[in-house]
Image: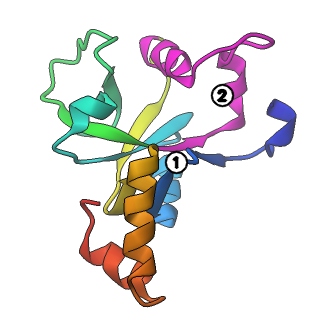
Amino acid sequence: MEGFFPKNTFLVINCDILVDFDLNGAMDFHQKKKALATMVLRSEENKDSYGVIEIDREGRIRQFLDKIPDESGQDLKQFMFTGIHIFEPEIFQYIPADIFSSINDTYIELIRKGKRVYGYQMEGYWVDLGTKDKYETVKREIEARPPTFISQELTRNPAG
């Protein structure tokens, strides 16, 4: 897949979400932190159902899905992952070639090796469309609203 991506910073978004947030802010954060990878995160009461990501004061990911013992001694904030990644091309050095591999395995390796993996805390609208029921619910909500629903409602209803 590496050949399909540019030779500079790129974005990967899971296909089963609907989102409206400050992408420029996330890209600026990624660049200021000189991150190899940035996961866009959000507060969520149900974060356990999506997997908990914990970050330190600087936004560095210290705990990933309870797979990495945190030794920073800092109070960490818990978030959930939105399915939005920002990567530098160097990421491909850490993804095994020619075999199936989960990006989660790559994140665990990067964090254990002390690579610059950060979490950007988004504000805005996010909803999971990953099941037929969720998709149908959001579809009905959008169809029932005027065309301005997306731009207006999304900023008023950040909890999804």
From the viewer's perspective, tell me whether residue 23 is left or right of residue 138: right
Q: Residues within 10 Å of mark 1 (few under 14, many from 20)?
A: few
> Amino acid type of disc 1?
Asp
Estimate the x, y position of residue 36 in percent, counting from the top left. 56, 33
> Where is residue 135 shown, x and y percent of the image?
45, 55
Locate the N terminus and report the quarter of the image it occupies: top right
User: Measured along the vertical axis of the image, is residue 79 above or below residue 15?
Assistant: above
To which residue does mark 1 refer?
16
Measuring 41% from the left and 37% from the top, which residue is drawn there? 118
Identify which amino acid the numbered label 2 is placed on.
Ile
Q: Residue furthest left?
A: 75
Q: Give the mark nearest the N terminus, 1 or 2.
A: 1
Percent of width and height locating residue 60: 35, 33
Question: Which residue shows up at 46% across the image and 48% down it?
Answer: 132
Q: Nearer the viewer, mark 1 or mark 2?
A: 1
Which residue is painted at 40% across and 64% down in the image? 138
- Check disc 2 and report the residue beneath it: 91
- Residue 62 lies within the magenta run: no
The span shown in magenta is 83-112
Q: What SS does tag 1 mark?
A: loop
User: Is residue 91 inside the magenta stretch?
Assistant: yes
